[in-house]
């Protein structure tokens, strides 16, 4: 990762026709062999950054809007119309079907129920204390498949190897190699029984799920 950041200092595309919409003030670090559709909207501010580690695919009309940082691991792909907002860390080799919505923040309807929701949102943004608690980071680990129309709620961690069913709303953490579906999403079955081993051998396929990034 350090090598990548040193290597890619600025937002650069050799073919400007392949560049996404402009990013006013946002730092964009793009690894090798990334494909970003020109209709994608990458939007941030001077304190935020977007990191694509390499071999990433960003589809049509995708929106990525970091609050502080949104990162995609190597070989992770976002299909058409996915929306990622806030503080999000995504591992490597993840697959996102179309229309996935992920946000580390939310709208406010219950702080002062008598107020308009937009006014409550503004109240949060104008309060240092409330604003500091607004974003709850979302983590999606390696080798996850997020189904079409899925919604991932603030603060959720989806562990390695998990599958999120189509049209699901994920409101709580998902354990490794677990398949969940529904509203709210609940466990359907295990992709494999993820049990810790005393010894691991990187040359054995059966042991590979137990090796995490880093």
Image (spheres, rainbow, N blue to C red):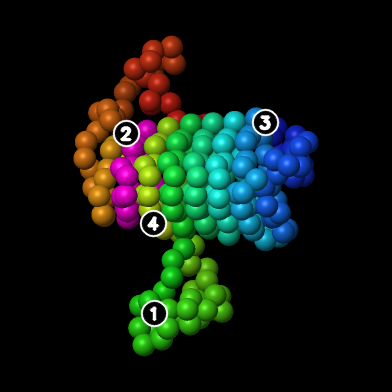
Circle 4 crowding by C-alpha within 10 Å: few under 14, some 14–19, many from 20: many
Q: Is residue 126 left or right of residue 140?
A: right
Residue under the point 63% across and 57% down: 43
Which of the marked residues, 2 or 3, is nearer the chain's N terminus?
3
Query: Which label was assigned to residue 111?
Result: 1
Vertical placement of residue 194 versus 175, above or below:
above
Q: Quadrant of residue 184?
A: bottom left
**How many numbered marks are there?**
4
Between the residue at mark 4 and the residue at mark 1, the CA separation in whole angstroms equals 18 Å
Furthest-left residue in this view: 188
Circle 2 crowding by C-alpha within 10 Å: few under 14, some 14–19, many from 20: many
Q: Is residue 179 left or right of residue 159?
A: left
For mark 3, give the secondary structure: loop
Q: Quadrant of residue 195?
A: top left
Residue under the point 27% across and 28% down: 192
Give the residue pinned by disc 4.
153
Residues in magenta, as a range: 156-174
Residue under the point 48% across and 49% down: 82
Between the residue at mark 2 and the residue at mark 3, the CA separation in whole angstroms equals 29 Å
Which of the marked residues, 2 or 4, is nearer the chain's N terminus?
4
Dots 2 and 4: beta carbons under 8 Å?
no
Dots 1 and 2: beta carbons under 8 Å?
no
Residue 31 in the image: state x and y as whole percent.
66, 35
Q: Quadrant of residue 74?
A: top right
Which of the marked residues, 4 or 1, is nearer the chain's N terminus?
1
Residue under the point 58% across and 35% down: 56
Give the residue pinned by disc 2.
177
Vertical placement of residue 110 versus 47, above or below:
below
For mark 4, give the secondary structure: loop
Query: Which label was assigned to residue 32?
Result: 3
For mark 2, give the secondary structure: loop
Between the residue at mark 3 and the residue at mark 4, the CA separation in whole angstroms equals 30 Å
């Amino acid at each position: 990762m350090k090598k990548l950041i040193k290597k890619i200092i600025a937002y650069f595309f050799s073919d400007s026709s392949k560049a996404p919409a402009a990013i006013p003030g946002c730092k964009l670090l793009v690894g090798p062999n990334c494909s970003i559709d020109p209709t994608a909207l990458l939007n941030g501010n001077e304190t935020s950054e977007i990191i694509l580690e390499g071999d990433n695919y960003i589809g049509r009309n995708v929106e990525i809007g970091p609050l502080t940082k949104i990162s995609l691991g190597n070989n992770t792909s976002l299909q058409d119309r996915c929306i990622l907002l806030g503080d999000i860390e995504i591992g490597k080799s993840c697959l996102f079907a179309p229309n996935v919505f992920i946000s580390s923040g939310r709208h406010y309807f219950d702080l002062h129920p008598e107020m308009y929701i937009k006014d409550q949102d503004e109240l949060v943004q104008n309060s240092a204390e409330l604003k500091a608690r607004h974003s709850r980071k979302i983590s999606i680990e390696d080798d996850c498949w997020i189904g079409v129309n899925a919604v991932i709620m603030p603060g959720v961690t989806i562990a390695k190897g998990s599958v999120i069913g189509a049209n699901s709303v994920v409101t709580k953490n998902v354990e490794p190699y677990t398949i969940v579906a529904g509203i709210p999403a609940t466990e359907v079955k295990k992709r494999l029984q993820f049990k810790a081993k005393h010894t691991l051998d990187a040359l054995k396929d059966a042991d590979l799920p137990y090796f995490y990034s880093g």
